[in-house]
Amino acid sequence: MEQAVTAPSIEAVRCALDPRGVAILGASDDVMKWGGSILNLLRKFKYPGAIYPVNPRADTVQGLKAYPSVSAIGQPVDVAVIVVPQALTLAAFKDCAKAGVKVVLMVTSQFAESGAEGAALQEQLLQVARRAGMRIIGPNCMGYFSSHNDLCLLNAQALMRNDVLIKGNIALISQSGALAGAMLARAYDLGAGFSFCVSLGNQADLEVCDFLEYAIADRNSQVIALYVEGVKDGARFLELLRAARVAGKPVLVVKAGRTALGQKAVQSHTASLAGEFGAFEASVRHAGAVLVDDFLELVAQAAAWGRLPAPSGPQVAVLSGSGGGGAVASDLVGEAGLEAATLSSETVQKLLALMPEAGARLPFDLGAVPAPQRAGDPQWLRKVLDTMLSDPNVGAGLFLMTTMPEMVPTAQTVVDINRESSKPVAFVNAASSAGTEAGAVLKAQGLVNFANIKEALAYLRNRLAYASATNEAPAALRFDAAAVQQAVAAWPDGLVSEFEAKRLLAAAGIPTTRGEWVRSADDAVRAAAAISYPVVMKLMSAQISHKSDVGGVVLGVADEAAVRQQFVALEQATGRVPGAQFDGVLVQQQVRADAELLIGTHWDAQFGAMLTIGLGGTLVELLKDTALLPANAGPQAIRRAIEGLRLYPLLTGYRGKPPVNVDALVDLALRFGQLATLLGPRLAECEANPVMARGDTVVVADARAVWQAAA
Amino acid sequence: MEQAVTAPSIEAVRCALDPRGVAILGASDDVMKWGGSILNLLRKFKYPGAIYPVNPRADTVQGLKAYPSVSAIGQPVDVAVIVVPQALTLAAFKDCAKAGVKVVLMVTSQFAESGAEGAALQEQLLQVARRAGMRIIGPNCMGYFSSHNDLCLLNAQALMRNDVLIKGNIALISQSGALAGAMLARAYDLGAGFSFCVSLGNQADLEVCDFLEYAIADRNSQVIALYVEGVKDGARFLELLRAARVAGKPVLVVKAGRTALGQKAVQSHTASLAGEFGAFEASVRHAGAVLVDDFLELVAQAAAWGRLPAPSGPQVAVLSGSGGGGAVASDLVGEAGLEAATLSSETVQKLLALMPEAGARLPFDLGAVPAPQRAGDPQWLRKVLDTMLSDPNVGAGLFLMTTMPEMVPTAQTVVDINRESSKPVAFVNAASSAGTEAGAVLKAQGLVNFANIKEALAYLRNRLAYASATNEAPAALRFDAAAVQQAVAAWPDGLVSEFEAKRLLAAAGIPTTRGEWVRSADDAVRAAAAISYPVVMKLMSAQISHKSDVGGVVLGVADEAAVRQQFVALEQATGRVPGAQFDGVLVQQQVRADAELLIGTHWDAQFGAMLTIGLGGTLVELLKDTALLPANAGPQAIRRAIEGLRLYPLLTGYRGKPPVNVDALVDLALRFGQLATLLGPRLAECEANPVMARGDTVVVADARAVWQAAA
């Protein structure tokens, strides 16, 4: 058979979500079975296209004419759903290929996720599909739906329990089918809907990126929610995240496998490469996406994103029916990295007329306002909210509804304000089932009932972070690429000495301490005199990476006698490390520092060159005061990362010291990132530590690198 | 009128919760009004005692005979509920006093919380009550109930919506009435009940501690949940927390006003002194109570505490119907400060027989187990759970229920296992309304449906922390109290010099660097020679506290010439601080350190002497790597605090350095705490920074103190 022409993935997704006809292989009368449930849901939500049950043992299924095979249908079948047992899937695939099916939705499991035998069969199916130009969703997935096309091929309890497939604006793309089901259930409870929702299973063919690409182009999808365990192609994923950003569509991501433990779970689950979360997080954030750590919060945040206006700033004004509730919420505002709003005196004056008893002080305790005051004017709460939000010192409101009088009209007011104001009021329903009716008011109008204060605040914080992302393009190369390539031209694989590593950095225009590599005490004395005392002396040995741990770094060597004495001592120190060979001594300029930094890069298999910036010198590993960025990050992003370090105040004139030239530091880090990006995967690691910073002087005092064999 | 004998507070609480008769002043036929609603709820929950509506304008109220005044009733009235307008409260109080009422429940507001006028009236009422030996709950509160006595005097929506006053084992004591209402609503949703629930309002008389004392003695209360904004008497509060611990009753506390913002909110709310949260948190934790940061979580945790067995360790085994859900939960386990369980090979072998497809690897993905495998044996899940929990490497289970088949029997199995096993399985209902029926199974049997993964993990973590608290008694005094008293005998108020502060520390047996306070360069040279070079020289000036910020500390002064030169330099440095006077120079032993610490005490108005231990020398303020303890903490607690510091690895042999003698550090901190406890409020602050630690040497290199006027 000839190799067929395969349609672009985005076209395959489009076809999957809006097919001319759907066949169900394994269709059943029994709705407790997959093949019965899927058919039932497809009809329940009134799919307008043709439906073809395929079942060689039946004439009709659920009252519809059944076919012995797909090829027997004789009409265009764009999508075939396969729910037959694993052993029958190969024959089913061949049947679909013969019938010209465009996309196979492969629900059946026991493939790559279950071991070598399953993986081999999955590969066989893939070959059949490739030859036929047929694309696959799954296997080992729960299906998908496209609400705007009234197409439901997702087997989920929430769909069985509800009569409407809500035509929403959130695209939900999930590697896990069970989580897609759980997220869908929460969406129904929130009155939120998905434009489409897909569970991807093993991603033998179509994968997260294909659906993401489609969602960016899809006018029904305004917010994109992802549950991912690992991505196949990091570069494409990031490219799409940037495209989504340009398209004005926020992408919210829950990533499983963020910790070693979660990673293990993911690997046993779908054999995805969970990857290193640090690189994932840094890359995805830099590309402008939002990370959320729980799948139920993902739904609430995505739903809120589509319905609430954006906060104009981090100042949150809290209102509650309970003074105590307002106080607790205010505590949590600060802990969520947001700020408590403080009203201008003009606003306070206006509000005093509306709530003289409560003193118009934030957080507002509506319970302190006598009922007649509120009840006398049906627009009272609306006026309070309008006045409050019109204050430029308020970025967002948070309404904490405890059990209180007039919950239903209160909820309606909050719905209205979110529709009509340019700033949001996040609504937390803390009244449990006593707030059911008020919650229903929000749900009916698609406004999120946040389940608790923290969830609402996490949403506001994420939305602000999204708005403030830099979006800068990579900076122009700040050095001569040829000089950098030249510096590494002769490098053998393995650990690179400080001397060589600094030569590379110097080629990229990065300042390094002056120094000379000497093999004798006499040369050391000569070098020290040329550099001027005091000097630093460092043991050189290809086998010793962390020199200071073995007494291999001597500071403040003050005169010739000391140089000679230390030369001998360093040679002897080599002998204390089994197998280490003495390669001489580096004699270097001694630099004083008010702050010591670590700047380094490493190559991540999925996301490429990554840049680390940290403060703390030898304490850096304990303090973990580091930031991680893609190595192609621009100067703004680098500056922000530096400003976000816990020890950043060390650089701004701490305890009477002169401030460090942060521009110089940004330039150094930028060059570092650029050289790592340029050199690619062979520069496995390159690290400058310490980088000595004092006033305008920012200079690399020590460095190391690892050069690895070309792939 | 004679001053009446006032009953002890605990007797007043007992009487309030189990009165012989209840009068309602302001009783109304209109159940939308307070005086109607309270009466209605009292009858709805079948209070068996006598009920006396008091209303001078009615013969009957809600069908009951009404009285014109309490004194007209002519029967014993233990509790009078006052809901009349503020202007009528004084007359009402006098009526109650005349009638011999024991406890007045004062719902009416507009007292101390609303300004000076209200505060004055509150004081007047208090005087009336004191003269009559009558106690007050409130004013400005929502009332209380005692479920075991079928007494409901709390006006809350959840009580209006439910037909049963659940006889639970949680005592809920809340300064906020609206929050008590919200917490009650959640408790109903969880199927949990309160033994009693009280909202305290302004606490004009009876307060948190009085109800806490009662709860500790009350056999119906097994778990105690508090919402507090501030406590009146810190020492009594801590004493009661310790008593609760001895009685085996966990106390869970939400404290509002943890941040500056929340504090502001609390002050405007009930005029409570929110206090400094750091001292509150440290003292309350040390006394063995548990802090929770959200009131809805407080309810879930208290309910779980009363129903679930305690975890045997921090190793959490996650099960889910979703592999993805298990992965997300596993990520959150680590982030919550717990550990992922790893099964022993014996357990894996046993489990493989039950779930060969899922490989018996944690987290368990029940969705990966074929339905026939599960369905073939109704006891399948129970066997999996029993086998898993019997592994000594598992401390607790977490069942994450996503939308999945067989949710109801699954929920029942989780209920059963929590009843019959010695280890808990926390249940998270992540199926939203698709999990309603399963949730109802738990609710009906009083087992908590945690709302999300984080809430369940916070509970497990808190319960483990509670179990591992040290409970040690204060240590015996390690020094001669008279010597310490003597050291401060002549101190004037204000800033105490390093020299004097070190004399105090030395009196408590705390090692300090040797040194001499000299006024001339000649004396400095003599002192340096006696100490031996190199020495440290420090500027002495009563006006300069942070010497190193003004160049007032010179390290490594190597010889006589340098001493003379630096003496002049220090004298000149004084001139750079306006108003500062040169008081000479301290010449001191120079000590090398592998780690620098800060150890200090300060006096907290509510909780007394507090001890701070931190690492990081001059960086300590940036790193915020400090622990706070009550100053009377014992050596175990101090050791744990040190071990919990982020930089603790610096003390255990970091990068080849010798380990620091932590026993010596514990001893130093213990003595520090003891001297602060001994000296009381006059020692406002005392701080040693840096404390130089290197191997067995732990010595104070600098110190300062603030001595304040006797109160």
Image (cartoon, coloured by chain):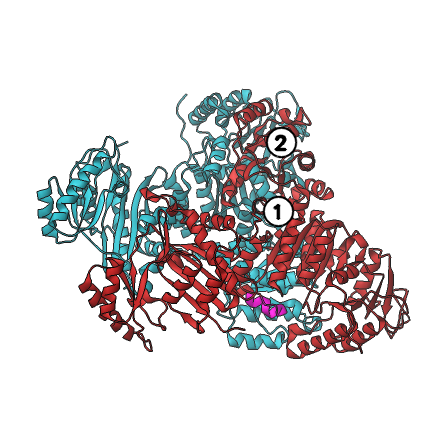
Chain colours: A red, B cyan
Residue A686 higher or lower than A162, as above or below: below
The local secondary structure at tag 2 comes to helix
Q: Which residues are magenta?
A: A263-273
Q: Nearer the viewer, mark 2 or mark 1?
A: 2
Q: Is residue A288 visible?
A: yes
- Same chain for the residues under marks 2 and 1 in the image: yes
Q: Earlier in the sequence, mark 2 or mark 1?
A: 2
The location of residue A73, given as percent across then percent down, is 89, 70
Magenta: main secondary structure: helix
Q: Amino acid at mark 2?
A: Leu
Q: Which residue in the protein does label 2 denote?
A: A385
Specify the quadrant that holds the C terminus of chain B.
top left
Does the segment drawn in magenta span residue A226? no
The local secondary structure at tag 1 comes to loop
Label 2, label 1: how far apart the Cα atoms are: 21 Å
Pinpoint the chain carrying mark 2. Answer: A
Category of crowding for the residue at label 1, using alpha-carbon neighbours closer than 10 angstroms: few (below 14), some (14–19), many (at least 20): many
**Nearer-the-camera pick, B705 or B367:** B705
The location of residue B533, given as percent across then percent down, is 14, 54
Q: Is residue A627 visible?
A: no
Q: Amino acid at mark 1?
A: Ala
The location of residue B52, given as percent across then percent down, is 60, 29
Q: Which residue in the protein does label 1 denote?
A: A451
Residue A147 located left or right of residue A431: right
Specify the quadrant that holds the N terminus of chain B.
top left
The location of residue A505, given as percent across then percent down, is 42, 60
**Nearer-the-camera pick, A266 or A612:** A612
Pinpoint the chain carrying mark 1. Answer: A
Does the segment drawn in magenta span residue A270? yes
Residue B419 higher or lower than A592, as above or below: below
Residue B90 located left or right of residue A658: right
